[in-house]
Every structure is written in structure tokens, then in C-alpha cells.
Image: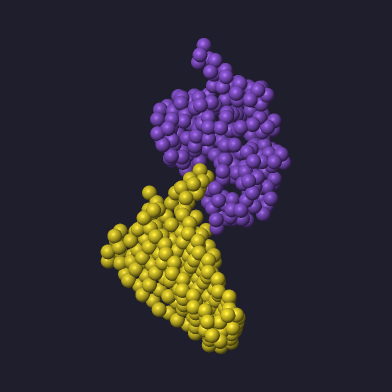
Amino acid sequence: MLIINNLKASIGGKSILKGISLEVKPGEIHAIMGPNGSGKSTLAAVLAGREFVEVTEGTITYLGKNLLDMLPEDRAKEGIFLGFQYPIEIPGVSMVNFMKTAVNEHRKHNGLEPLSASDFLKLMRDKKELVEIDSKLANRSVNEGFSGGEKKKNEIFQMAMLEPKLAILDETDSGLDIDALRIVANGVNKLKHPDNSFIVITHYQRLLDYIIPDVVHVLYDGRIVKTAGKELALELEEKGYDWIKKEIENNVTA
Amino acid sequence: MKYSTVQNWYPGDKEGKGGVFNFVTKRGMCKGENSKISWTQIETGSAITWKYPSCILRGDNSTGEFYSVAVTNNYQQADTGTKMTHIGKNTKSTIVSKGISAGHGQNSYRGLVKVLKNASNARNYSQCDSLLLGDKCGAHTFPYLEVDNSTSIVEHEATTSKIGEDQIFYCNQRGISTEDAIGLIVNGYAREVINKLPMEFAVEAQKLLQISLEGSVG
């Protein structure tokens, strides 16, 4: 589904990603962990197509296409979804209107007719139930005045609406209480399907108690320094990131 | 009386050359008790707009309203607002002005709220919001308040905001193009005023807002 090969990227001339290679197959859940400033969010930004990140080297192939040639909205319509670490507020634009525009853009892209108002509202109701979000959220403006937890749940709701092939969740668990965390995780588990994949970027093991990853990568200083199964997350939780740092330093000096 | 206008005169070329100058002075008098005048306007065209639909609130308990959205793109200038003259007792006025500036466009709100000596318990609320697209446009507010009656309450609120790259990217990431994202955000911003328009007018106005801003963010 996604093949990243020797990706290097910088922001404002400062090198952040220093050669990342990664392959995500259909149906897989990958967790990317790592300390602050290791490049996790930058990687998510590159995949979604943010302009301020400059790709200096490497390739990204998504479903056989060169991802780096695609506009952000085309990537979205081809099935890439980014769950934002800090979801953006859009005052005056109702969630209904926002989602309707987004869903119909996706449908147009796939050669489908726009949904009728009643079909759309039914879809919204079904998905709201699926991700257990308060139906009041949908009548409010996009993220405006939402609490931190509500914003994150709203990201999962949007993901459910758009049914992406590849969902990247950028620290969706940060700032969530345990109930909200469970809702977010349940949302992911319910949407999991043999044809779609997830990249879950997280700081803590906690989320991975609910979302079981197939592969865990540790990102440190712009490189993937360790890749293993789900047990790696537990080891990290126990030993902390210092353990990884020490191991790398030892390798360098050795 | 409710008076709604949507104006889209020729704004001239990209530099504003050849565009129409639009100068409007409309005034209404609320003569009787409990009478009401409501102005709603959407201004998207002409090179320069000067427009000040006003209300003279002479009857006791009369009400004046002014709801406005003005868009300026390229080198357009809009200078618009209202005069609310409170003469009668318990008179009320509401002013909601929303300016949207793009390109080198300039938007000014210029308004006068005047409360005469005998207009006891007069009430005014004014809200002036400005939305900026890009860094070469401008927004200005010139609210004048003349109050000669100590029992009246006059309020003025103003905000200025910018469409952020973050907002546009958020829309992009959901599959919405930049052009459509701006339309969505601008219509959301102007919704309070557009909602005051009659239904079929509101649909036209929404489209017009989007068309007026086409190509304003590169």
C-alpha cells in the first residue's frame, strides 16, 4: 500500500527526517513511537502533503503512484486520511456542511453521484453511532469551542465518514482521558478491515493497549532506529526512550 | 420594511481600471410607533463602493437594522456602513457588518450611531468583523457614536481575523480543494448576514461570494 524509501525532509532548511524507509501492507497497523522532536509529526505532514515540509531526497509510493506528485486534496481523495494532532477550528462552517462537501468530493472522485440530503444525514447518524460521538457535535461549527477530547473524537468521526484506505493518526491519544481514549481506539478497531491500513503515531504505550499494532517502529532523531512486533511498545514503556538513546550511542562509539 | 440588495457591478480589470463607481445614500424613516426598517446588503462588485443605508428612528419603540457583507478583491475599495439616528423613546438598532478583503482590496466600515436627548432607553448593538485573505489587503473601521441621553446603551464590538493556511490545509486533507475551502470558510463567516436574506437570494449570494474571491489565494 505504502512504500517509503530513504525519505529525507527538512523544515526551513533544518533537516528533520534523515532517511526513513518503511513499508505498510494492506490490513496492517503500524505504530510509530519516539520521543518529542524525533520527527513523528513531520513524517505525518509529509504524507499528507503539507507545503512547509521540504522533501529533499527519497520516494514515497502509494498504491503504485508517486505520492509526492499529488496535491493534498488528491491524496485525501485517493484514501489518505490524517487525524490531526491539533484539529483546526473553522468558525461558522457546520460539521454537516463540512462533511457533506468532503464526502461528495470523495464520491465525485470515485465517479459517484453526490449523496442526497437524507442519505447523507442517515450516513452521519450511522457513523456517529459507530464512533459513539454526541449527536450535538454535528450541528456545531467545525471544532469551534470543542474540548480537546471532543476534537479528537471528531477526527475519528470524520475518518469513519470518509472510510480511508490509509489512516494516519498523529498523536490522537494525547490529552485524552481513559473513556475518550477507549472511544478513539474502538473507532479504529471497528474501521479496521483487511483492505485498509493505519499508521498510529503515539508517544505512549497506553493507546496500544487498545489498538494492537502489527509492527512498532521507534523513530529517533529522524531515523527509524528499531522495528519489531507489539512487544517493543511494552519494552519501551518499561525502559523509557533513554534506553534507545543509550543503545544508539553505544552503537556509534562501538 | 425589509430591503435586501445584492450588488455585483463591474469591478474593472485586475488593476481596477474601468470599474464602476457605486455611490448610494439610502435613508428610511421609522415614523410610527413600533415601526421597523431592516437593510441587508451583499456588496461584491464595483471598483469603489460608498454605501450608507440609514435609519431615522423617530417613532417610539421603532427598530432599525443593518446587515452587510462587503467583499473586495484585486484593487477594489468598499466604504460602507450606516447611520442610526435615535429620536424616539425605546428605539433599538442593530448593526452587523462583515468585510472580506483579498488581493489589494480595502474594506472600511464607517458608521454613526446618534442618540438624541429625548431618546430615552435607546439601545444599539454594533458588530464589525473583518476577514483578511493574504497580506496585501486591508480592513478599517470608523465607528462614530454620539450619545446625548444617559439612559441609552450603545455597544460596539469589532474583530479582525485571517483565513489561515492551517484552515485551508485541514479542508484539503478532507478532499476539499483550496478554492472550495475558501468558499466554505467565507460563507461560514458571512452566514449571520446571509441568513437574513430571502431564500433564493441567499443561494445566489453564496455563489457570488465564492466567485468574487476566485483566484485570490495562489
**Which chain is the one coloured yellow?**
B
- View extreme (top): residue: A254
Name the spot of residue B10 as percent of width and height, x first. 33, 66
- View extreme (right): residue: A179
Q: Residue at x 44, y 28 (%)?
A: A8
Name the spot of residue A68 as percent of width and height, x first. 43, 34
Q: Colour of chain A?
A: purple
Q: Residue at x 46, y 54 (%)?
A: B162
Q: To which quarter of the image does residue A194 belong?
A: top right
Colour pattern:
by chain
Residue placed most toward the observer, A104 or A58: A58
Name the spot of residue A41 as percent of width and height, x first. 53, 35
Residue placed most toward the observer, A179 or A30: A179
- View extreme (left): residue: B17
Residue placed most toward the observer, A28 or A230: A230
Q: Residue at x 57, y 17 (%)?
A: A247
Q: Quick check: can you spot residue A190?
A: no
Q: Is residue B212 above or below residue A254?
A: below
Q: Is residue B28 above or below residue A96?
A: below
